[in-house]
Image (spheres, rainbow, N blue to C red):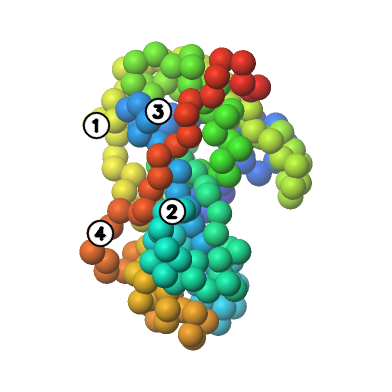
Amino acid sequence: MVERAGYTVGLDGDFFKLENDSDSAEVRFLYKKYSDIKVTTAHKIVLDPREEVAFPKPVDCLRFNDEPFEKCALCEDPNYFTTRSDLFLFDMFVLNKSIIVPQEGNVTAAVNNLTVWSRSPKMYAKLGSALRKCQGELVSNVFEITRIGKAGSMQTEYNINWLRKDDVTLESLPSIKPIRAKALIIKTNEEMKFYIAKGYFEEADDNQPARNTSEPTEREIPATPSNDSNF
């Protein structure tokens, strides 16, 4: 957890979160254009219930909606099909890079500003509204995200406001791929079948296992909201 003047930003497990009501952060989205953002369909499941503390994590769904269920073992099994939902994993860079975190022995280290923000599709409309103010490449625009809702509230909303444009390019920032790999677990169909039979993955960890491709089964985002969309 990183404490900053005016807000608290969680970077637990490389995921971005705002903890409390009115917390905010300045961010840039790591895309050149809006159409580069993809929606992911995932099954949220506990990777290994044998762990002392086990939380559901998103496992990439292997099929598109018009494809047969047998292409994805988790879809084919009625007990796990209900865990399937769409989500956006927004690649982001949190500003205020000069913030440091005290470590043991009074040694300081810079915060890793690369992060992924996992949100449901309803966030898409707000993001689309803010993006209409963008100039040039998306990554060159800075936004402020503000949490509206107390810690733990299920009715939490987020405001996204455009702040300014600068000359930052995607090529000038570190690669998000290592962190993205932790945000969405990719498994093969055979690994899913093992999970269904045993209740856990053979190697239950946050690292992506071997697969023919390291890319998730990403979908295109919906059409850009109209100008009268509610922000």
**Outermost residue to the bottom:** 198
Type of amino acid under label 3 = Tyr
Label 3 residue SS? helix
The residue under label 4 is 213
Q: Nearer the viewer, mark 1 or mark 2?
A: 2
Q: Nearer the viewer, mark 1 or mark 4?
A: 4
Q: Are marks 2 and 3 in contact (CB under 8 Å)?
A: no
Sequence-wise, which precedes: disc 1 or disc 2?
A: 2
Q: Is residue 175 left or right of residue 153?
A: left
Sequence-wise, which precedes: disc 2 or disc 4?
A: 2
Q: Position of residue 140 (x, y in %)?
A: 36, 21
Label 2 residue SS? loop
Q: Nearer the viewer, residue 196 or 110?
A: 196
The residue under label 2 is 66
The residue under label 3 is 34
The residue under label 1 is 171
Image mark for residue 147? none
As measured in the structure, the alpha-carbon distance from the residue carrying label 1 to the one carrying label 4 is: 23 Å
Is any part of residue 34 visible from this angle?
Answer: yes
- The quarter holding residue 36 reads top left
Type of amino acid under label 2 = Asp
Sequence-wise, which precedes: disc 2 or disc 3?
A: 3
Q: Nearer the viewer, residue 113 or 106?
A: 113
- The quarter holding residue 93 reads top left
